[in-house]
Amino acid sequence: MEVGIIGASGYTGAELLRLLSRHPYADVSYITAHEFAGRKVGELYPHLWPLEEMRYEEFDPEEALGRAEAFFICLPHGKAMRAALPLLEKGARVFDLSADFRLRDPSVFREWYGVEHAAPSLLGEAVYGLPELNREALEGARLVAVPGCYPTAALLAVAPALRRGWLEGSTVIVDAKSGISGAGRGLSLETHYPQCDASIRPYGVNSHRHIPEMEQVMGLLAGEAVRVLFTPQLAPMSRGILSNAYLQLGGGAPQEMRSAYEEDYGGEAFVRILPEGQWPQTKAASGTNLCLMGLGVDVRSGWAVISTAIDNLVKGASGQAIQCMNLVMGFEETAGLEDLALFP
């Protein structure tokens, strides 16, 4: 199958190129990058030597549709939806890695992203691409909204508990650290090396745009409104997310929690529940599509902590997008995603 990548010069686009270069059923036939149109992949990313002679192009919907049948869109919010529309109108499959199709309510999208949605009618059609929670809906989907990196780590952490109605109250606390690549390839003072090295700091406190995405999905899982108190932090590492989710439990959950999580995730290829007493580390997930998970309950307070580690560029973005493509197209779910972590 021929696939295209719209916006292939950023970190998520580069990860798609890396992973798809060895995919058994998909070949990259079309890549775009406005700023780097005409330049070769090898000029930007020498490590992608199997594809080094490919050239970035300006996005042209008609040209794209003649070259591929499925597309990954790696553009900023607001721009991705406009690129997706002509592709969808001609019957292509679209996997959007921006936030443009994740939220169901266009007014919520406008509130958090500051722009009007160009295709509000598609928000009800887009399938939220977290396979471990939404696998059946992905089969044969036309438009997939690939989740954000922080929501992926947080939602996998709390889903089994929320499904069983174990949340006491209505609040989930998420405390998460991300590598600097999560900010994208563009330059800024906040992600400048001297600013980040040997330092860690919170940002977007109570205002991060992934909050409504988490609340939307957690509410669907719980069957009632859930509020998320989210504190993201920038950590001095290139890639990776370590997320700690906290929720107060009710309904006898402490005795059943581990067995419930093992029941829900025991057959999953990309979720690993660590033995009791072990906790995940970002390095062990680096370069993989894995979500590593540790969990425990503080019996004194009745609060649970579920810790997850993912690679923000793989399970948090490009790898998950390919996992979704595999399900949509009927390929093996693990195709192209079976690498072990890079360590140290």
Image (cartoon, grey):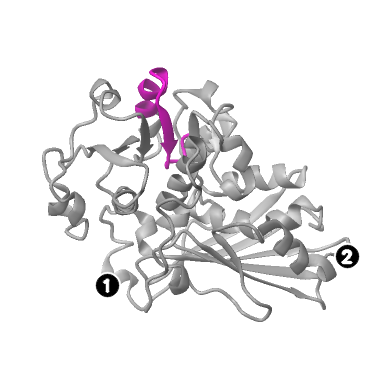
User: Which residue does the numbered mark 1 point to in the structure image?
Assistant: 194
Among the 4 quarters of the image, the one containing residue 128: top right
Residue 199 coordinates in the image, percent (x, y): 39, 75
Q: Is residue 118 above or below residue 148?
A: above
Report the mark closest to the observer, 2 or 1: 2
Q: Is residue 91 magenta?
A: yes
Q: Looking at numbered disc 1 in the image, what kind of residue is underneath it?
A: Pro
Q: Which residues are magenta?
A: 82-100
Q: CA distance from mark 2 to mark 1?
A: 49 Å
Q: Is residue 235 above or below residue 221?
A: below
Quarter of the picture containing the N terminus is: top left
Is 146 displayed left or right of 226 in the figure?
Answer: left
In the picture, measured across the screen, residue 188 lies left or right of residue 344, that is left
The location of residue 217, given as percent across then percent down, is 64, 44
Residue visible at 82% across and 70% down in the picture: 254
Question: Cβ–Cβ below 8 Å for labels 2 and 1?
Answer: no
Give the mark nearer the N terminus: 2 vs 1.
1
Q: Of residues 64 and 84, which is closer to you in this image?
A: 64
Indicate which disc residue 252 carries.
2
Q: Nearer the viewer, residue 28 or 330?
A: 330
Query: What element does badge 2 sit on?
Result: loop
Is 244 above or below relative to 208?
Answer: below
Is residue 153 shown in magenta? no
Quadrant where the C terminus sits is bottom left
